[in-house]
């Protein structure tokens, strides 16, 4: 399974354990590296910059030969910690950064100064060409099977379109739950895959057993798209609570989103409220179960160690 991604990150298999808000942690990433894949954690999983710094040092100390780890940065104005997080990552060092929800220009500029590779989330060719022109090392092609914030195009359509028009590696994100799925993405021209939802039900994940078990009990048909988390369409498990609150923005949010002056603030407030609700559901017992996941949980049949999940994906 040698591809441009495995060569770029010096890993055995062309797989990135996707960064997942609240789910990802250093234990998961260490096991990912031991299993021959790369691991990534959202910088926002750490409340303070000091905690982020400690995590980086822990991963560097545990990194096996041939391992790679990185962090995900939200690079738009909704993340007030962005500049500080980027500074810490560049000071302490990591193998790669994945950017989301904004322009990666500053991240690419600063990361490349210290030898850190930058991969950028995109959902279409327009943004793929923009990040390529900015100097991104690879594209994360987020398709309509991704968990969390997803794209609108099918994996085949998006991968083939980007591969035909871009000169940097394309990494497919979404719709991978078993080896057959990986083989399919590679056959479309992808240099590798980013896999998230199957790792929610890992022994090492930083979420409740109820969240993990939900990924076992529910399947692809139970995934719905909601606007009630961050203001941007996001996939969640269709629990009774999600059914109760609905998946569309409130009428007030819809009206305010049309106001150019207020739109930014409405999105920031919705993002804050949604992330808090997601955090509560993921980390403690509550009837307000808003569990983020993608349709690839279809292949999740039990809670397993990260090592075993990787073996399922590659063998």
Image (spheres, rainbow, N blue to C red):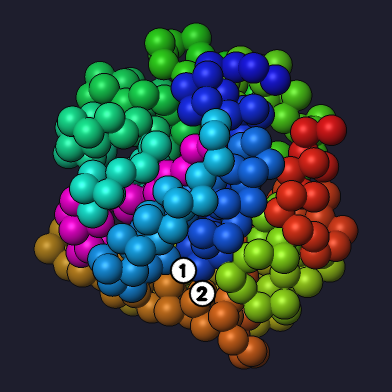
**Whole-number angstrom distance, CA of label 2 to CA of label 1:** 8 Å
Mark 2 surroundings: few (<14), some (14-19) or many (≥20) residues within 10 A: many
In the rendered image, which residue does mark 2 sit on? 278
Residue 201's image quarter? bottom right
Q: Which residues are magenta?
A: 67-87
- Residue 84 counted in the magenta span: yes
Name the residue tied to disc 1: 229
Q: Is residue 162 left or right of residue 281?
A: left
Element on which disc 1 rests:
loop
Q: Is residue 52 above or below residue 196?
A: below
- Residue at the extreme right of the image, as rendered: 301
Query: Residue 293's mark?
Result: none
In this rendered view, identify the residue nearer to me: 284 or 293.
Answer: 284
Query: Is the residue 188 above or below the residue 226 in the image?
Result: above
Mark in the foreground, 2 or 1 = 2
- Based on the picture, tell me whether residue 305 belongs to the magenta stretch: no
- Which image quarter is the N terminus in? top right
Please give the name of the residue rendered at 87% of the width and 58% of the height, measured from the top-left corner.
Answer: 301
């Amino acid at each position: 399974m040698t591809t441009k991604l495995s060569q770029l990150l010096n890993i055995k298999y062309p797989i990135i354990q996707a960064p997942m808000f609240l789910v990802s942690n250093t234990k998961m990433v260490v096991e990912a590296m031991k299993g021959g894949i790369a691991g990534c954690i959202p910088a926002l999983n750490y409340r303070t910059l000091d905690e982020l710094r400690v995590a980086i040092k822990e991963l560097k100390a545990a990194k096996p030969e041939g391992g790679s780890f990185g962090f995900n940065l939200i690079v738009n104005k909704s993340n007030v910690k962005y500049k500080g997080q980027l500074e810490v990552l560049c000071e302490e060092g990591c193998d790669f950064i994945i950017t989301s929800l904004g322009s990666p220009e500053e991240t690419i500029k600063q990361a490349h100064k210290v030898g850190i590779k930058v991969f950028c989330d995109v959902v279409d060719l327009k943004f793929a060409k923009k990040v390529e022109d900015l100097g991104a090392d690879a594209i994360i092609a987020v398709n309509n099977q991704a968990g969390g914030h997803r794209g609108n195009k099918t994996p085949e359509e998006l991968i083939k379109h980007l591969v035909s028009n871009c000169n940097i590696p394309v990494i497919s994100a979404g719709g991978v739950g078993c080896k057959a799925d990986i083989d399919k993405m590679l056959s479309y021209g992808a240099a590798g895959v980013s896999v998230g939802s199957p790792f929610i039900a890992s022994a090492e994940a930083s979420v409740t057993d109820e969240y993990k078990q939900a990924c076992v009990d529910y399947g692809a048909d139970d995934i719905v798209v909601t606007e009630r988390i961050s203001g941007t369409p996001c996939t969640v498990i269709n629990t009774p609570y999600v059914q109760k609150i609905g998946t569309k923005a409130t009428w007030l949010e819809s009206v305010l989103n049309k106001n150019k002056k207020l739109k930014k603030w409405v999105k920031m407030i919705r993002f804050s409220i949604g992330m808090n609700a997601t955090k509560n559901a993921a980390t403690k017992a509550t009837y307000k179960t808003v569990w983020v996941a993608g349709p690839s949980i279809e292949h999740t049949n039990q809670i397993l160690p990260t090592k075993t999940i990787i073996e399922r994906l590659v063998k």
